[in-house]
Amino acid sequence: MGDRGGQPHVAGPATRLPYLVMAPPSTSASPVSATLSELDLRLITQVDEALGTFLNAVDLPPNLKSAVVHAVLAGGKRMRPLLVLHSAAAVGGSFLDAMPAAVAIELVHAFSLVHDDLPALDNDRMRRGRPTVWVAFGEAMAILAGDALLSLAIESATASPRAAGEITREIAIATTHMINGQVLDTLGGFAAQESDRDRLHRIHHNKTGALLVASCRMGGLSGGATTEQLAHLSRWGSLMGLMFQIVDDLLDETASAEQLGKAVGKDREAGKLTFPGVMGIEASRAEVARLDLEARNLVRELGPRAAPLQGLADFLATRTH
């Protein structure tokens, strides 16, 4: 547990966890975004170092390890680990205790991207400005690398020093929901009477929202959250899931491939449901503003330790990549 009266502990060079060695934050600037706080940029560096140390220690064939490292260490916003760490801090926990869960959720996220990019699903060739795993290593290796990332996530979650069983259960439930959402988005399975808007919300409550809710809950569990605090974090995570997807859909309509590091406009071309397509661009932007305001009220109820969560909400609402 961190000092409940001050800033949560950021691990130093001598701190050790199973599979992880936490290094001090780098002094170099992060390329992710200037709008993230200095604390967030330091934590992103520590998450990257924890991920690298974890993957370096696991026993995998060299070709599989190369594919896994390609999938995980290609950069990214690390938003899900940040949600884990700040949710833990919001309830009085420490970043250190929450780091195994933060690593676990990012490995699940990486697994989902590796499989989503496959030709049978989204057929994407670029991810974060680099060739996707199936392009770089072949389809068979991409399938197996995704499989490995999911089992490695479970391994990291079980290393959590508090509530490891509950945290691992959150990973399993969220992953099932995420797969449900991908099926609905790609293959269908809706009831005939569902409206496009209801279908869209059901897709992204599962496909995008489930991992963001799980991130907040895993952080809360790592920090010893009360039932009420966990409920607040769950609701906040649900708002972030919806906001994240609406902004993602808006960027897919308005940003360039260079900005996003991947192809744009593919969902619209494939006839998939998107928020701008169903609601319109201006109504989608208004919904983002409404969600940001509701999130701000929830953060206020959680108390001053939760303030960094609102910084993340503001970043998600205004991000450009």
Image (cartoon, helix red, strand yellow):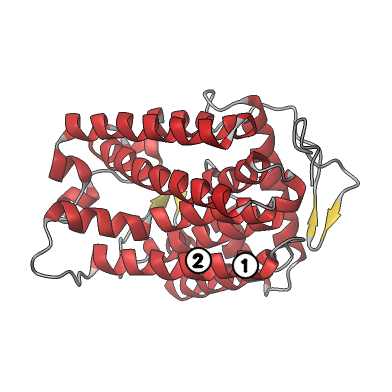
Rendered position, 22 above or below 300: below
Q: Which amino acid, mark 2? A: Phe
Instruction: Give the CA distance from mark 1 to mark 2.
Output: 35 Å
Name the element at disc 1: helix
Q: Quadrant of residue 227?
A: bottom right
Location of the C terminus (image quadrant): top left
Residue under label 2? 137
* Dot 1 and dot 2 residues touching (CB under 8 Å): no
Query: What amino acid type should be assigned to the residue bearing mark 1?
Result: Glu
On the image, the x and y values in percent for residue 157 come to 66, 65
Q: Which residue lies furthest to the left in this view?
A: 193
Q: Residue at x 81, y 63 (%)?
A: 18
Residue ID for mark 1: 166
Examine the image and state in which quarter residue 107 appears: bottom right
- Residue at x 17%, y 49% (from the top left corner): 268
Q: Which residue lies furthest to the top in this view?
A: 34
Query: Dot 2 lies on which element?
Result: helix
- Work out whether 235 lies above or below 32: below
Q: Is residue 116 above or below residue 236?
A: below
Q: Residue at x 77, y 64 (%)?
A: 57
**Frontmost residue, 179 versus 25:** 179
Can residue 199 be seen by looking at this rendering? yes
In the displayed structure image, the side of residue 97 where residue 243 appears, left or right: left
Residue 103 image point, x, y percent: 64, 55
Q: Earlier in the sequence, mark 1 or mark 2?
A: 2
Residue at x 70%, y 27% (from the top left corner) = 28
Q: Quadrant of residue 30?
A: top right
- Which dot, 1 or 2, sits closer to the camera? 1
